[in-house]
């Protein structure tokens, strides 16, 4: 038993020093990104916010989108209708330019700002540390080690020490050396935020290893084969103008149209149930069509397998939106915890190393 505890301590120490640092950096950037919608709207009201957006009918948004496509269609690589913090219509041009337009009047509101670009870079930093090619694997791999080894070893050590007296495991000692107080803060925050940290690290690993996770989750799927509709039933439009000008009749709202990069390429249409941030599950629909508007791919939340439905919730769970404002606040606070755990754990490690003759009991 003593060998197991010693081994768990070594695992917790070395995984914590390395992966804990990556988790700290990723957690701090993620905490800031939680409030990206509100911050961007505050900094960019002229391009992102529209008065009376809640009462604006879908027909009006689609009509404006159709007119903008007629005006700029040949130069576009994507067209984004209002979604999340963006209440305007965004046109992405082939030369990389981004311009925003009023969803009712079609009046140009402005171009992509420095703050919008900052949060785009922040998200890339959060997911890749801005390290080319391998950054996403460093972050995703650290997330897996974080929940599979660091959290489990930490809880194991806490349980072995305090299972007979849990109250002591949830307390902070007084009038003790600073190094031991670091330990008390470390074990208290670790056990209090065990579940939130587990949820965030597991969901965070989805962004790097989505195919692997889907393969693992397939064990939950029904063995019966599901046949998805890929026909005119799911996309009855015969032109892009028609698809842009007419709202979907199944409750989904058109979010984006991605234009083919080549003459033989495909159009991609992405639909969402809710245009703006709301609690609950994220339900989406995606359709790809050829130049003649023949459907080649159709994916819709309610027709997806259980594994696909679970994977689709990785982002709203990771950022806390599944349970609304309370969830976002919880994720914001939880994102700060890895850095505190890393600092307190390291300080306690240094304290123990400099006091080898002192055994903490």
Image (cartoon, rainbow, N blue to C red):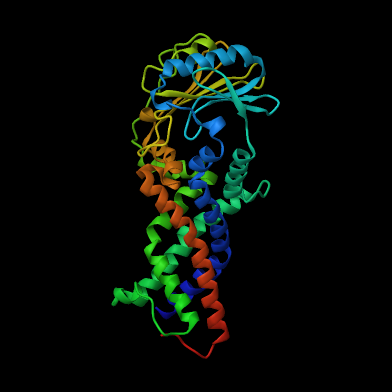
Q: Residue at the far right: name it.
A: 95
Query: Would residue 273 appear left or right of 83 to someone viewing this image?
Result: left
Q: Quadrant of the C terminus?
A: bottom left
Q: Position of residue 199 (x, y in %)?
A: 41, 52
Q: Position of residue 258 (x, y in %)?
A: 57, 23
Q: Position of residue 155 (x, y in %)?
A: 39, 67
Q: Quadrant of the N terminus?
A: bottom left
Q: Residue at x 50, y 8 (%)?
A: 238
Q: Position of residue 27 (x, y in %)?
A: 52, 55
Q: Is residue 110 above or below residue 157?
A: above
Q: Residue at the far bottom: name it.
A: 357
Q: Is residue 187 above or below residue 39?
A: below
Disc tally is 0
Q: Residue at x 55, y 57 (%)?
A: 142
Query: Would residue 165 appear left or right of 203 to someone viewing this image?
Result: left
Q: Residue at the far top: name it.
A: 238
User: Which picture quadrant has residue 292?
Assistant: top right
Q: Is residue 313 above or below residue 9?
A: above
- The one nearer the camera, 7 or 123, is 123
- The one nearer the camera, 181 or 342, is 181
């Amino acid at each position: 038993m003593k060998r197991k505890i010693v081994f768990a301590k070594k695992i917790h120490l070395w995984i914590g020093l390395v992966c804990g640092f990556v988790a700290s950096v990723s957690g701090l950037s993620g905490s800031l990104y939680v409030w990206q919608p509100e911050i961007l709207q505050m900094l960019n009201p002229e391009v992102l916010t529209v008065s009376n957006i809640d009462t604006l009918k879908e027909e009006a948004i689609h009509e404006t989108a159709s007119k903008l496509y007629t005006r700029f269609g040949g130069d576009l690589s994507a067209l984004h209708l209002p979604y999340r913090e963006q209440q305007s219509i965004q046109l992405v041009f082939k030369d990389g330019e981004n311009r925003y337009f009023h969803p009712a009047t079609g009046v140009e509101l402005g171009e992509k700002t420095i703050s919008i670009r900052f949060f785009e870079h922040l998200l890339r930093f959060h997911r890749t540390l801005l390290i080319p090619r391998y950054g996403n694997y460093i972050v995703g791999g650290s997330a897996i080690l974080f929940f599979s080894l660091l959290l489990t070893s930490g809880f194991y050590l806490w349980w072995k020490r305090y299972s007979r007296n849990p109250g002591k495991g949830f307390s902070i000692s007084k009038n003790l050396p600073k190094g031991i107080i670091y330990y008390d803060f470390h074990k208290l925050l670790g056990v209090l935020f065990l579940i939130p940290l587990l949820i965030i690290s597991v969901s965070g690993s989805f962004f790097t290893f989505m195919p692997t996770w889907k393969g693992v989750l397939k064990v939950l799927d029904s063995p019966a084969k599901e046949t998805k509709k890929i026909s005119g039933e799911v996309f009855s439009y015969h032109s892009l103008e028609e698809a842009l000008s007419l709202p979907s009749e199944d409750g989904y709202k058109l979010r984006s149209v991605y234009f083919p990069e080549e003459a033989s390429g495909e159009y991609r249409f992405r639909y969402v149930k809710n245009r703006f941030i709301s609690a609950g599950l994220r339900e989406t629909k995606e359709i790809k069509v050829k130049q003649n508007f023949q459907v080649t791919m159709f994916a819709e939340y309610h027709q997806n397998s259980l594994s696909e439905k679970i994977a689709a919730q990785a982002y709203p769970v990771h950022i806390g939106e599944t349970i609304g404002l309370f969830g976002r606040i919880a994720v914001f606070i939880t994102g700060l915890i890895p850095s505190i755990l890393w600092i307190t754990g390291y300080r306690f490690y240094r304290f123990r190393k400099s006091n080898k003759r002192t055994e903490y009991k």
